[in-house]
Image (cartoon, coloured by chain):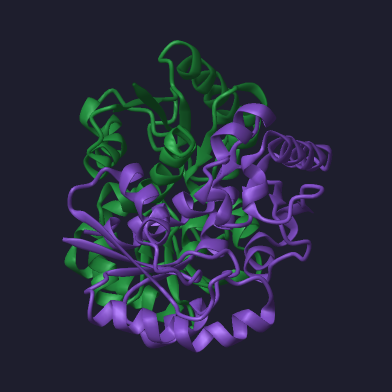
Chain colours: A purple, B green
Amino acid sequence: MRVLGLIRVLSTNDAELLNRHGRLLDEFFGDPELTVVSRCIEGHPDGLWNSAGERKALPKIVRLGQEMARGDGATALLVSCVADPGVPELRETVEVPVIGAGSASAATALALGQSVGALSIVPGVLPPISNVLGKHLVGWEVPVGVKTTLDLMSKGGKERFVEAGERLKGQAAEVILLACTGFSTVRIAPFLEKRLGLPVVDPVISAGLAAYYAMVGNR
Amino acid sequence: MRVLGLIRVLSTNDAELLNRHGRLLDEFFGDPELTVVSRCIEGHPDGLWNSAGERKALPKIVRLGQEMARGDGATALLVSCVADPGVPELRETVEVPVIGAGSASAATALALGQSVGALSIVPGVLPPISNVLGKHLVGWEVPVGVKTTLDLMSKGGKERFVEAGERLKGQAAEVILLACTGFSTVRIAPFLEKRLGLPVVDPVISAGLAAYYAMVGNR
């Protein structure tokens, strides 16, 4: 049995919401030997949106990861947030592989092309992503007027997203990286890929693949 | 049906040898909807070992990739060589995603850790790998006295490999990248991972995962 411990940084008692990323991975892999266990940290009902929140969350993420490696028998951990909060610290303290959605999705983008443009809902470039992409990061765009991933659910919000993707194409991006796991929650990648005509990297699914490699690649 | 077109740069009429990398992927994915079709270029019975050979092979690789995208209905192409020969050129000429074993396996290594050490059988750092890894490439080691992947089959050859991996650990590598697809042919990654106690990235399997993402991630 393979247990992937998925750490949500959005605090919720709603089991459906808690398990949404895990369910995406379950459906994608369709591997009866894989179990995805999702747990969340406490005290962050709006998720992590700035570095102050990240700092506060850090010890909770590390503690939760340790519990999942021990209590849930997780054979790999996935921190389902593109800011990779707690990933370096967890790698120091647990024995199992630790994957961050930011670094892992950026890495997947590099497997698909040389020039990567990132779409986000925060304007500042996230270090785990720029750290992996280096000179291959050609642009970072935020859709005009889109404040939360909920805005994506409207037709107008989706079009703002396509426009931001077109701006990245204008910057010679060959691959589009979705730099927010909320974009996985609403599964906008297939829509964008069709509209932009470029490969679009979904952060949760691509990071799940890296975790799968870490668990199964050498078995 | 998903068809992955796998391009071998080792010319052979031996179907078992031709299909060896494809079979690794078939076994790894166990996806009945995935078909891996392997074909090789002509005139390179010893594979590609230097830039002169790569230059000569380049137009053959591009032609073969075009044929596979058309004739075999490949929905993604994988060039099964860590030097990524023909990958940039194929990306210019075919509509389907093109994955190179070098850039894709290097990308997988970046998803697993910050500091990557490469094990190869050629002493010179390969550009597709250093291009992806940048500052994260902390070392490039060649096992002493190992000339071909056949030498790995002997017990002594395997030990030389462990020693080279230990040298990379001494250079603070957190992840080991196997920078030759011949290492996939002999499936040395599980052995090395156990002996070194670090994640070891198999180039064919990790590149196959990236190709799988490109084919299926947004379906």
Q: How many marks?
A: 0
Look at the picture and state if B124 lies above or below B32: below
In-image side of A208 versus A141 (left or right) = left
| Residue at screen point 54% across, 23% down | B60
Q: Quadrant of residue B42?
A: top left
Q: Indicate the quadrant containing the N terminus of chain B: top left, top right, bottom left or bottom right.
A: top left
Q: Quadrant of residue B177?
A: bottom left
List the single residue furthest toward the front: A13
Instruction: State the residue in front, A83 or A43.
Output: A43
Instruction: State the residue in front, B42 or B191.
Output: B191
Percent of width and height locating residue A111: 55, 47
Look at the picture and state if A109 lies above or below A160: below
Percent of width and height locating residue A123: 78, 61
| Residue at screen point 27% across, 31% down | B19
| Residue at screen point 25% across, 36% down | B26
In-image side of B123 versus B40 (left or right) = right
Percent of width and height locating residue A42: 45, 80
| Residue at screen point 66% across, 28% down | A195
Q: Indicate the quadrant containing the C terminus of chain B: top left, top right, bottom left or bottom right.
A: top left
List the single residue furthest toward the top: B71
In-image side of B77 versus A153 (left or right) = left
Q: Is residue A178 visible?
A: no
Percent of width and height locating residue B80: 43, 39
Instruction: State the residue in front, A3 or A115.
Output: A3
Q: Is residue B57 visible?
A: yes
